[in-house]
Amino acid sequence: MTTRFGSDPARLGALDTPADSVRITGVQAIPFALPYHRAPEFASGRVGTADNVLVRVRTDAGLVGQAEAQPRPYTYGETQTSIVEAVSGPLNEALTGVDPLRIELVAERCAGVAGNRVARGAVDLAVWDLLGQILECPCHTLLGGFADDVAAAHMVSFAEPAVMAEDALAVNERLGVSTFKVKVGRAPGLDLAAVRAVRDALPDADLYVDANRGWSYEDAVRAGDELAELGVRAIEEPISLEDRVGRRRLAERWAVPLVGDESCISLAHVDRALNEHSVRMVSVKTARTGFTESRRILDLCLARNVAVVVGSQYEGAIGAMATIAFAAAFAATAGHPAEITNFLDLADDLVVAAPEIRDGRARVDTAPGLGVEVDEDRLARHRLDR
Ligand code: MUC
Ligand code: MG
């Protein structure tokens, strides 16, 4: 007599015959809105409310994989509505009937839906959550399980310089975080004042900056040169992606690496950015490339000896759990602070238990899959489709 996965531990690892494998019965997209107490603001946009999407991959075994998508129209062109439509439409059709263990088949089916980066990233993460549940193994372990924890970096969103310094100091005092990505990309004088204020508040902190393409080339030269002098470790996306000559000149000008983020939204984009010599460090974000394509990007960067930072899309707790699992899973990422704390900018969240940041670090979740447990009452309160 054969049993479904997950009901008989003795069967762990003994894959049932295909006829008995789990099948995806549908992919659901639930739009929800969460309030912020510290709204993310940066040169390319402002997130007043977290208008995100909960993705649920359902199966005939009763198991459900979950992940979170965060629309960023100014980065990927997706909106909450387009993510709901892509997930519940073409991506749902692409995956219905598929065995979630066949992760490469899942990836190829989803790749058949062009664009829709964040929708596809969330579906990939939700399928991996399912994979871990079926195999009764944490995603972190399935990915490689290199380390049990990872250091945290916190993104300091736009405000007056003094307020940004207070924000960083509070996160340092409360969570022990000592690495900060300071948002810049405004007038160079204001950017320099903000970084100086954070530096004065936390003389021993590691700082890097992210201009979200907000500077002109001239501003980037002026601000970037002074910021590098201030000891900033890296400068992310200084100017327009279209200014390929300018980006290359800046990457060659600065002793600190120019980090690719918006220019590195897929494996092919990373390859192009590296071939243009316009980035010398790559931000990998599970929110857009899931686990499957994120580890391909990681392998490409390893092959080319390019450093990686595991970045953030200002995810909520669900997204942070995926980021922590990925960052701790590989030797190439576990030793570098990952951007995992900004879910704390939210005034509420969907999960029963959010990741804990202590002494500046986050431990991986040891539950099968991603370890996501959604509080259904909170979901009912924040979902927008009912
Ligand atoms: C970043 O690194 O750019 C900006 C928009 C978003 O979704 O993430 C932020 C952080
Ligand atoms: Mg960035």
Image: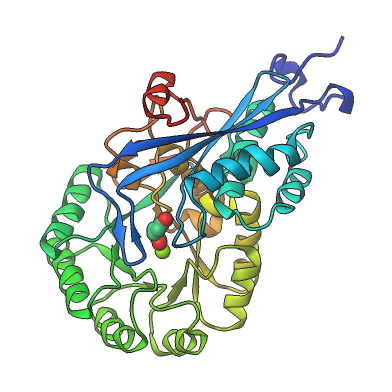
Residue 381 in picture, x, y percent from top left:
36, 24
Viewed as shown, does residue 103 lie left or right of 136?
right
Residue 332 seen = yes
With 260 as the anchor, is 127 left or right in this view? right
- Residue 15 in percent (x, y) is at 82, 28
Asked if residue 304 lies left or right of residue 375, the reply is right
Which residue lies at the image location 15% right of the left edge and 59% below the top edge? Answer: 165
What quarter of the picture does the C terminus occupy?
Answer: top left
Q: Quadrant of the N terminus?
A: top right
Q: Nearer the viewer, residue 81 or 169?
A: 81
Residue drawn at (48%, 77%) of the image: 241
User: Eyeballing the image, is 123 above or below 22?
Assistant: below
Residue at left 51%, top 81%? 278
| In-image side of 4 versus 293 (left or right) | right
Q: Quadrant of residue 211?
A: bottom left
383 vs 327: above or below? above
> In the rendered image, is residue 355 in sight?
no
Which sits in the foreground, 213 or 234?
A: 213
Residue drawn at 84 percent across, 13 percent down? 2
In-front residue for pair 92/133: 92
Coordinates of residue 224 in the picture (x, y in percent): 31, 82
